[in-house]
Amino acid sequence: MQEWWRSAVVYQVYPRSFQDDNGDGVGDLKGITRRLDHIAELGADCIWLSPIFASPQADMGYDVSDYISVDPLFGDLDDFDELIQSAHDRGLKVIVDQVLSHTSEQHDWFKQSRVSRDNDKADWYVWADPLPDGSPPTNWHSHFGGPAWEFEPQRGQYFLHNFLASQPDLNFHNPDVVDAILETCKFWLDRGLDGFRLDTVNYYFHDQKLRSNPPAQAKPQVMATDLYGMQNNIYNKTRPENIGFLERLRALTDQYSDIMMVGEVGEMGHRSIEIMGEYTAGTKRLHMAYSFAMLGPDFNAEHFQNCIQGFQRGAPDGHPYWSFSNHDVPRQVTRWSEYAVSEDAMARFACGMLMSFEGTIGIYQGEELGQTETELEFAELTDPPAIRYWPAVKGRDGCRTPMVWEKDAPNAGFSTGKPWLPVKAAQAAKAVDQQRPHGILAFYKETIAFRKASAALSHGTTAFIKMPEPILAFTRTAATETLTCVFNLSPDTHTFSLKGEAQIAHGAAAGLDGAKLTLDGNGFAYLSHKSGLKISAD
C-alpha cells in the first residue's frame, strides 16, 4: 500500500468561495473542476472539500439534511463524479468533510425523532427530561452561545446540540445510528472518494449518565460565543466510546484501496495534542488527526516545538497533520501580523515553516496568495455567532470571502453575480493574475516542490536544537539527506555561528557568509550539510 497521505500536501477548498460557475454568487462543483489546474500546478496532492451535502445552510453546510445528496447550491451527483474523475486525471486525491456528530433539524431522521418518544427514530438523537425545575438536564454549553440543550414541546424533552439549536446531536450510543452513519460513508467511498476529513471527531459520544461538567481548573479567557472554556469538558465530548467508533470506521475504509481519514480534534491547548496521539495510535484508528493547536494566536518557538514534541511523545507510531489556517480561524498573515516585517514576509515565513514540519501538511485556499483577513461590516455578515455577538466577535466570514483570480474582472473572477460574501479591494489586489514571477504564489510552488523532492522533509525524523526565543531550529534527517531548519519568529535580525560546512538549500530573508548565518526579520533557512553541523545563536 502506497499510503500517499504520509507526505501529502492537502489543499482545502471552501466550495462556497472557490469558483462560481453558474453566476448565482455561490461557488459550485463545476467551478472547482474548472480551477483544478491551479491546485495541481501548486503541487498539492489532495483536495479537501468542505461540506457539499444537502443542507439548509444555517451553518454553511455543517448542518446536513441528507448525507447522500449533493446540495443543489453546489450541483448534483454527476457534477461530483466529474470532479472526482477530473481530479484523479491530474493526480489529485479528493477527500470530503464528513459532519457525523450532528445533523440539521431538517434531516428526515430528526423530523421523525422529534415527534414522539416511541417512533422508529425516537432514540436516534440525544433526548433527556427536564430537571424538576424545568431547566436543562446538564450544565453543558453550546459553542454558539447559551445552553447545549433545546426544549422540544412535542416530546416534552430537551435535545442536545453542541452548536446551533438547529444542529441536533446524534445518539452514537444507539448501534442503529452507527450503522446508518457507516452506510452513508460507504456511499461516497463507492463513488471513488479518497477519504474523509472528520469534523469535530471527538464529539460523537456523550456521557450517558448526563453528568454536568466541573468548572475549569485554570481561569479561562472566555469569549462571548464560547463558554466551553469555563468548564472542564469531560462529559460532553472526548468520551472513551469514541475509540470504538473510529475503529469501526477504519475497518470500513480498509476495505478500499489506500483511503485516508484525518480527524479534526475540537480542543485547544496541550490536551488537543494528547487526543491526536490517542486517536492515531496503532493501525486501527484514524490515519491522521489535527487540532487547533497551531490555528490560534500563539506565535513563539516554544509553542510550535511543544506541539510537535507533544505529538511525538503521545503517539510515537501515529502520524500528524499540521496546518496554520482553515475556514474557522482568521487568516495566518493577519493573525500573526504583530510579529511580521510585512504581509509578504509573513506569508513566505509561514509557508517555509509549515512545509518543514514532519507529517502531512494542510493549506487553506488563498494562503498561497498571501491572502489577508477581510474586514466586513455588520450588514455583510453571514456567520451565526458573529451576527449574534457583533461587535465583540468578528466571526469566521473574514477568512471565507471568495477566492480571487483576476483583479479587474467582476468580483475578481469569482462570480458574474453578486457574491455571497463581498470581494474587497485589499483581497482582489492579491489575485492570481497579480502574482509576480517571484511573488507569494511562486514561492509556495517552489517550497512545495522542494519539500516533495527532499527525502529529509518528506519522511525524515525531527530532532530539535536548543535555541533562545524567537528562534525555532531542528534537524530533519533521512538516510540520504540531512537538513537543519532555522526560523526567526520576529521582525528583528538575528545571526548564528556555524561549526561545519553548510549551504542554504532554500530560504527567505537569509544569508550565509562563511560560518555566519544571518536571518533578517521573518527569515528562515533550510541548511544542507553532512552530519555534525553545530549551530549557535550569537
Image (cartoon, rainbow, N blue to C red):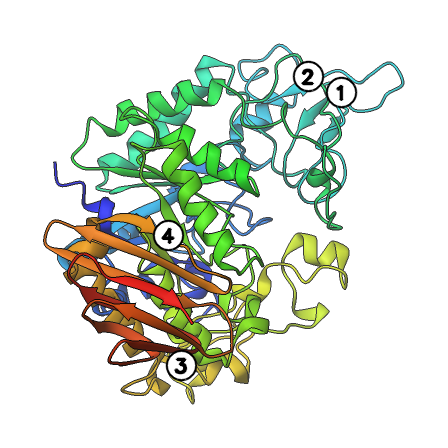
Please tell me the numbered disc located at residue 137.
1
In this rendering, is residue 497 above or below 210?
A: below
Gap in Å between the C-alphas at discs 1 and 4?
36 Å
Q: Residues within 10 Å of mark 4 (few under 14, many from 20)?
A: many
Residue 43, given in percent of the width and then of the height, sits at 22, 64
Q: Secondary structure at mark 4?
A: strand
**Of the residues shown, which amino acid type is indicated by label 4?**
Leu
Please tell me the numbered disc located at residue 49.
4
Q: Residues within 10 Å of mark 1 (few under 14, many from 20)?
A: many
In this rendering, is residue 360 above or below 256?
A: below
Gap in Å between the C-alphas at discs 2 and 1?
7 Å
Residues tagged 3 and 4 counted as in contact (Cβ below 8 A) = no
Q: Secondary structure at mark 1?
A: loop
Which residue lies under the disc numbered 2? 210
Q: Residue 92 falls in which quadrant of the image?
A: bottom left
**Of the residues shown, which amino acid type is indicated by label 2?**
Leu
Q: Secondary structure at mark 3?
A: loop
Residue 479, given in percent of the width and then of the height, sits at 11, 49
Residue drawn at x 54%, y 26% is 170
Residues tagged 1 and 3 counted as in contact (Cβ below 8 A) = no
Q: Residue furthest right?
A: 133
